[in-house]
Amino acid sequence: MCGICGIVDLRGGCSFTAEQLRSMANAIRHRGPDDRGELVLGPVGFGFRRLSIVDLAGGHQPMSNEDGTVWIVFNGEIYNHSQLRPELERRGHRYSTTSDTETIVHLYEEHGEDCVEHLRGMFGFAIWDIPRKKLFCARDRLGIKPFYYAMMPGRFAFASEIKSLLEFPALRAALNRNAMPEFLAFGYLSSDETLFSGVRKLMPGHRLVLDLSTDDPQPRVEQYWDLETSRAENSRSEAEQVAQLSELFEETVRMHLMSDVPLGVFLSGGLDSSAIAAVMASQRQDQIQTFSVGYAEQEYSELPYARMVAKHIGAEYNEIILGPSDFFSSLPELIWHEDEPLVWPSSVALHFVSKLASEKVKVVLTGEGGDEIFAGYIKYPVTMWNLRGGPIYRKLMPGVLQSQVRRLLASDALPDVVRKKLRHTFLYYPEAFEQLYFDNFYSVFPQELQTSLLAPAVAEELRGSNAYANSMRFLLPEGNGNTTLDRLLYLDIKTYLVELLMKQDQMSMSASLESRVPFLDHKLVEFAMGIPAQQKVRYMSGKHLLKKAMIGRLPNEVLYRQKKGFPTPIQPWLRTVLFDKVSAILTDVRLKDRGLFNPEYIENLLQEHRRGSSPATEGVWRLLNFELWCRIFLDGEAGANVSHSIGNASPVIAQSSL
């Protein structure tokens, strides 16, 4: 696991300095504190920071082929590199290391741009082919590892994190205003754009080529992998499916244990991380290390389940407990690490548990991706039910009565728990997919509310924008063998999951810790997509086949408990001990002077939040993080000054080992 960066002079000269390259690399030192490397090769410069995991002595980068004509900087892990090596050696390639990085170089020599099709792992890399004057870049199929880039006059730059690009003098941090509608709705962007004007991300399963032999070099970006959803008739029995899943899952966990340094596992107490921990424990001779995070507020903590699993599999258990001061004083630092406003409070918990794990191991396995490939979220069966039942309801129920039901659900007349459940159904939302799915489960500020939230001039400027357009590009058409569940899973894998993986990468790397995601081995993802819908969702509960595969390996209390989704007590914290601080930030003159939002709307939002409105609390969280992001990146304010506006850091409440 590493941090990479680079600069290309598109005119073929060398209009950058080694010091500029070094500054870019040093900005992401946390990604690789063990080693560094910079190299200037004519019009191309590579920078590198290394977290040593495989071939500790011989994995220095940038790395080249035998004659120094092909150079690479690489971030990630190639889990099948030892299987690829013998054939490459038979083809005459001479290895000087045992690292997976060198295998990519020789694969490129053999297969050119198609080398990515042979890789099984997580990766973001750049290759400079000197004879062909070609820069070749690629990102792994699911987007586990990041890759950002920017075109500037006469130059192209790339990096593992946006902050590295911003070290280059020609690139100034500026808000991408056109991205605001999508960001306000989702908290992330599902296209190749970012919140920074001029900075793009290479999308998962894509490669980029920059040919300097042409008169006007421009990035050529193309997709090399996509997830197949249509399937042949599946005649296998459930028992056969369970056996195949068990075998493939065992294999992918085994491959993800490739390391020359100690490994551990993040254990939330949910099914996904528990399944990985159980299989990992069965494959290791030594006692495995598990790491968990929770809160003193018991209703928000899943630590009892994590402890249960650790005891069941005989693991060494480590935990950390967070309080409101730890949580909120860390926000500026973590926004700096993510390069973007935090979307989910779980980013903070992930950072702290990563710091805990880094005291004992350098690599952790995590359960990220299990919900998206095995349909673990309740939103999937609810949406399928809404799409089936909604048309019938609207056909049989008079429009006047439909309106009365919606008004009732929008009021406080019903008990809160009843109102919340019914507002997720077709009784409250109209037929349009954007409202029935996105506004129902994702949108903090649905597009219809943004005119009120935004300042009038900004609302007018963005009038023609569609907050949902980028995500809707990934909603597969009906037919062609695509079930409703297939379409929902494909959509989330291409959008929501990519943001989760960015959070996973940046928060673990903030503690110089490598995180691996066995559920997102592309072979396992492809197998999971081929599982019939009825073997994923059964009786409004997902992961049916995975639960079957883990019977006998995990306690029933873990296998069949209701999913919590890693809750965080930000609602009570924001409404009580932290309300005054948060309110001061959101009503501060600096936010008003930006001219982006309607101050009156924000004041009303704060009051609704104080009265107990959950949607209002989510809105407050979104705007708080956005304002802190503006102060850090657009205003250039030091993190310590931003932290002072929230509160001083305090020690972790508790840390224990069972």
Image (cartoon, grey):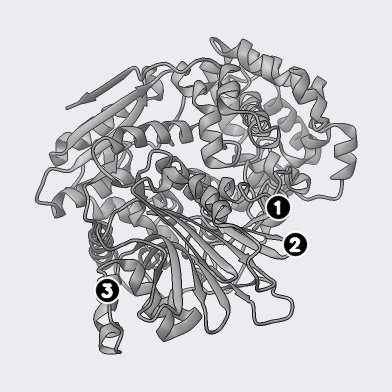
Gap in angstroms between the C-alphas marked 2 and 1: 8 Å
Residue under the image location 86 percent in, 38 percent down: 458
SS at circle 2: loop
- Which is nearer the N-term, disc 2 or disc 1? 2
Q: What amino acid is labelled 2 in the image?
A: Pro
Gap in angstroms between the C-alphas marked 3 and 2: 38 Å
Residue 161 is situated, as x and y percent measured from the top left of the image, at 54, 49
- Which is nearer the N-term, disc 1 or disc 3? 3
Q: Are marks 3 and 2 in contact (CB under 8 Å)?
A: no
Q: Quadrant of residue 610?
A: top right
Q: Nearer the viewer, residue 80 or 528?
A: 80
Residue under the image location 47 percent in, 61 percent down: 142
Residue under the image location 45 percent in, 30 percent down: 567
Residue 167 is situated, as x and y percent measured from the top left of the image, at 61, 47
SS at circle 3: loop
Q: According to the image, label 1 marks what residue?
A: 170
- Which is nearer the N-term, disc 3 or disc 2? 3
Residue 206 is situated, as x and y percent measured from the top left of the image, at 55, 68
Q: Residue furthest bottom?
A: 91
Q: Crowding at label 2, few (<14), some or many (≥20) Cα neighbours within 10 Å?
A: few
Residue 96 is marked as 3
Which quarter of the rendered picture does the C terminus lie within?
Answer: top left
Q: Residue furthest left?
A: 285
Q: What amino acid is labelled 1 in the image?
A: Ala
- For this view, does 632 lie left or right of residue 236? right
Q: According to the image, label 2 marks what residue?
A: 153
Q: Quadrant of residue 479?
A: bottom right
